[in-house]
Amino acid sequence: MLKLSKKAEYALMAVKYIATKQPESCVTAKQIAESYQIPYELLAKVLQQLVKFNIIRSFQGINGGYSLTKSPDKITLIDIIKAIDPDYRITECMNEKSSSNECSHLDCCSIRDPLMKVQREIDKVFKNTTITQII
């Protein structure tokens, strides 16, 4: 079933951490990594991706770090997950464009449609859950 990647988990953890520290100051990648015992290098890449998708912003310099681009009640889990794993899904064939090249059982599969319904429900939960709700 659905399992988020480590990168997506780290992204959720990082955004939550930043949300708990705002609006006081910027948060550094080092602070987040140490707080959650996350590999710094991997976290830095995740944070760069979140900046690219305008979920957080980065500030350079001695007082630099990261802050949210908007209120935590406006950032949903799906925003963060899709920034890191744009193609997340329960199984490989959940993509509407899946072909028999990707799955030899696509033409006779009896679980794809029910699993697509499950995927939509999971998506709905992620879309309706904000960072504020997990703080």
Image (cartoon, grey):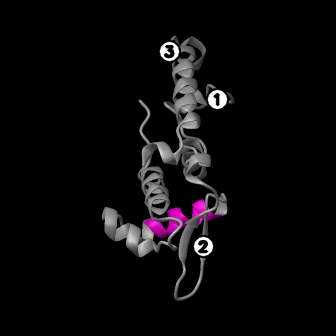
Instruction: Check residue 5 in the rendering and tell me which mark sits there, or answer none.
Output: none
Magenta-drawn stretch contains 49: yes
Q: Which structural element holds mark 2?
A: strand
For the residue pair 75 and 98, the one nearer the viewer reads as 75
* Magenta stretch bounds: 43-51
Q: CA distance from mark 2 to mark 3?
A: 43 Å
10 Å crowding of disc 2: few (<14), some (14-19), many (20+) = some
| Nearest the eye: 75 or 5 | 75
Label 2 is placed on what type of residue?
Ser
Instruction: State the separation of the CA atoms marked 2 and 1.
Output: 37 Å
Residue designated by label 1: 98
Q: Earlier in the sequence, mark 2 or mark 1?
A: 2
Disc 2 and disc 3 in contact, CB within 8 angstroms: no
Q: Nearer the viewer, mark 2 or mark 3?
A: 2
x 52%, y 84%: residue: 63
Residue drawn 69% across the image and 30% down it: 97
In this view, the residue farthest toward the right is 97
Residue at which label 3 appears:
111
Number of numbered discs visible in the structure rendering: 3
